Amino acid sequence: MSQSVAFIGLGAMGYRMAAHLPKHFDTVYVWNRNFEKAKQHAIAYGTKAASLEQAVQADIIFSCLPTSSDVEALINDVQIKSGAIWIDCTSGVPDSARTLASSLKQLNVDFLDAPVSGQTVGAENATLTVMVGGDVAAFERALPALQAVGQLIKHVGESGAGFAVKAVNNMLLAVNLWSVAEGFSALKAHGVSLNEALECINASSGKSLVTETIFPQRVLSREFPVTFGLPLLAKDTGIALDLVHQAKLPAPLLSLTQSLIQAANLTAEDNSDFSAAVKMYEAWTRITLE
Ligand code: NDP
């Protein structure tokens, strides 16, 4: 495609997502705070390592940073090309998406909140789920670029709706992770083999992504590979709980889960994977899930 595209933020997700863009676009700029990563990406995938000023002159600009505050700080610092679409794949804050969408509209720039799900393996294989909030016409214009990185791509509502869906999704992941840790500790305390139990549960109604992949591959294996940081999950459960509070709803289970994940994050070793949240429960019970 003759449109130019840029990708800002070559982290665990961004590095892999940006790798697909040269298959679909002639000009792909990449920028990263630690610029060595951008240079490395250019060599590996045929993208162009660019200054931030140059990257924001692209027709379509992707970002994938840890938080909405990081995205806001960056956007406030640059002059984006008029007519561009900014696709923010950060798992961000709905209020921030609404503010950015309306302030960028004044500059004739469309902002879409387009967080992704599917972990680093989904980014690698371009099989991510993308949940998009914002203007429908901008979504339709952005679709070919989104299709380069995702499989299920859904417009879910106005600005902020994408971020909201993502936050609730990750809260559900956290609820699952914690509940599986409790259930499996009880099984181990009763002398049940966890691998056999897992096989049964994965053919039964209690199964989830946590029982199917997270527990066997990360927890029971004791590998806890760092692909999605625990601080990021703690951020997401916080965003989800803010949504509940803003709607003035009771949410005892979600409130408790957010506190547990927050506490696990505070007590975890630096640079822990989200799955390492179960280690806090293991410390309470003195049962190791292996
Ligand atoms: P990483 O921590 O791996 O990468 C973060 C990226 O953002 C790096 O490129 C980093 O640059 C850059 N960055 C951090 N702070 C700033 C800043 N203040 N200004 C400019 N650049 C900055 O994060 P992930 O890729 O794992 O996550 C990115 C987003 O995607 C998060 O919102 C996360 O919740 C979400 N997400 C993550 C998934 C996963 O499995 N990892 C799955 C789905 C969503 P530098 O290299 O210089 O540090």
Image: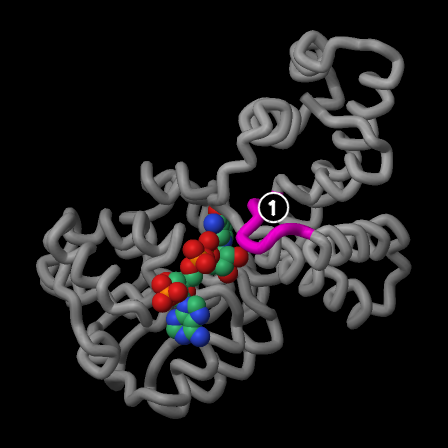
Does 173 sit above or below residue 157? above
> Does 99 sit left or right of 81 as displayed?
right
Is residue 279 magenta-colored?
Answer: no
For ligand 1, give the image quadrant. Answer: bottom left
> Does 218 sit left or right of 86 as displayed?
right
Q: Secondary structure at mark 1?
A: helix
- The scheme the figure's colours follow is one colour
The residue at the point 50 percent across, 38 percent down is 225
The residue at the point 69 percent across, 8 percent down is 196
- Which quadrant of the structure image shows residue 198? top right
Near-viewer residue (109 or 253)? 253
Near-viewer residue (273 or 248)? 273
Is most of the magenta stretch helix, strand or loop? loop
Camera sees residue 45: yes
Q: Quadrant of the C terminus?
A: top right
Residue that numbered label 1 is attached to: 274
Tell me residue 47's x, y (percent). 14, 58
The mark tally for this picture is: 1
Tell me residue 263's x, y (percent). 77, 56
Does 221 sit above or below residue 266? above
Circle 1: residue type: Phe
Near-viewer residue (118 or 131)? 118
Near-viewer residue (135 or 226)? 226
The residue at the point 31 percent across, 48 percent down is 16
Q: Which residues are magenta?
A: 268-274
The residue at the point 16 percent across, 51 percent down is 24
